[in-house]
Amino acid sequence: MEMAEGALELQMRAVQSGACEKLAWRAAEIREHFRLLYKNEGKLLLKLFPMLNDEGAVSLVLNGDKSPQLMELITNRTQGKTMNAKMHSAYLSLQQRVNAIYDEELDKNDQNKIPGIKQILEKKQGLFRMNMMGKRVNFACRSVITPDPYLDIDEIGIPEIFAKKLTFTEPINIFNKAHMRQLVCNGPNVHPGANYVVNSSNKKQMLDGMFPGFSSEDEDFRKRMGIAKGLEPANTDKLRQPIK
């Protein structure tokens, strides 16, 4: 379906002036919009959406062409006898798929369901509230599920003092050595940072206020730099052999 010349410009002016509220764009309108962009920004579009030419997109056929025609496949699978009925059925199916993004239970016909946002939030609440809160386990603390709108669905909110004191161990290896050294240099007050270093004798060396009352922040930073330079991966050759 082609749009009348200048129809898109009139729609855009009406939307910008507030004369009408545009809630959805049809495929023909989007195509016309790209055509208008191509008049002035053709080189930019070619850079953003590179496409092979006909010579570089040759399809290989083995034992006859078995590639189905996409339009015929969609038309045959869509319910309805007339084109208007098929379009209405396709519209309802599209709306169900969009609803399933938020709640998978809203799409009863799809057998291969993908968890929606509601299911992801419920799983987050169950894992956090049932498996972590109140449990005396390492590297965990008490908190609440906050309604903070700035948190993603895979994040939780805890007080700042908990975030600074709650740590987890990360061994040093040849792949993360540079990153671990940077964490030690940052210390406990810069994110991401480290609170302490555990040496080969299993002793902790704290990185916050190494000499309270006697050293400045600059001196503490220099001492952390020295500790960071001495970080090396564990030598597995010196480990004891397991008892058989």
Image: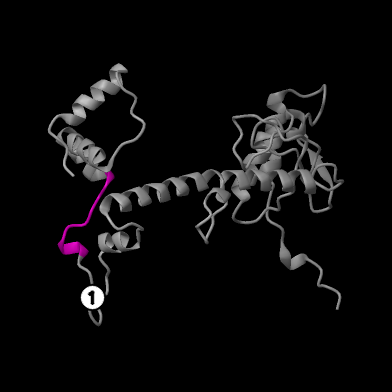
Compared across the picture, whether 29 is left or right of 170 comes to left
Tell me where the magenta segment starts and ends, as one range.
48-57
Residue 165: image location, x then y, percent? 78, 35
Magenta-span inclusion, residue 141: no
Circle 1: element type: loop
Which residue extends farthest left?
A: 5
Q: Residue visible at 51% across and 48% down?
A: 100
Residue 176: image location, x then y, percent? 61, 51
Magenta-span inclusion, residue 56: yes
Quadrant the N terminus occupies? top left
Classed neighbour count for the residue bearing mark 1: other residues with Cα under 10 Å, few (<14), some (14–19), many (≥20)? few
User: Eyeballing the image, is 9 above or below 233?
Assistant: above
Q: Residue visible at 12% across and 33% down?
A: 5
User: Eyeballing the image, is 63 above or below 148?
Assistant: below
Q: Residue visible at 65% across and 56% down?
A: 173
* Chief SS of the magenta region: loop
Residue 225 vs residue 143, the one in the foreground: 143
Task: Identify the image quadrant of residue 28.
Answer: top left
Compared across the picture, whether 109 is left or right of 75 comes to right
User: Eyeballing the image, is 204 above or below 208?
Assistant: below
- Residue that carries the numbered disc 1 in the rendered image: 65
Which residue extends farthest front?
A: 81
Residue 169: image location, x then y, percent? 74, 48
Quadrant the C terminus occupies? bottom right
Instruction: Look at the image and name its color scheme.
Output: one colour
Compared across the picture, whether 202 is left or right of 180 comes to right
Amino acid at circle 1? Asp
Task: Identify the image quadrant of residue 212.
Answer: top right
Residue 187 vs residue 127, the one in the foreground: 127
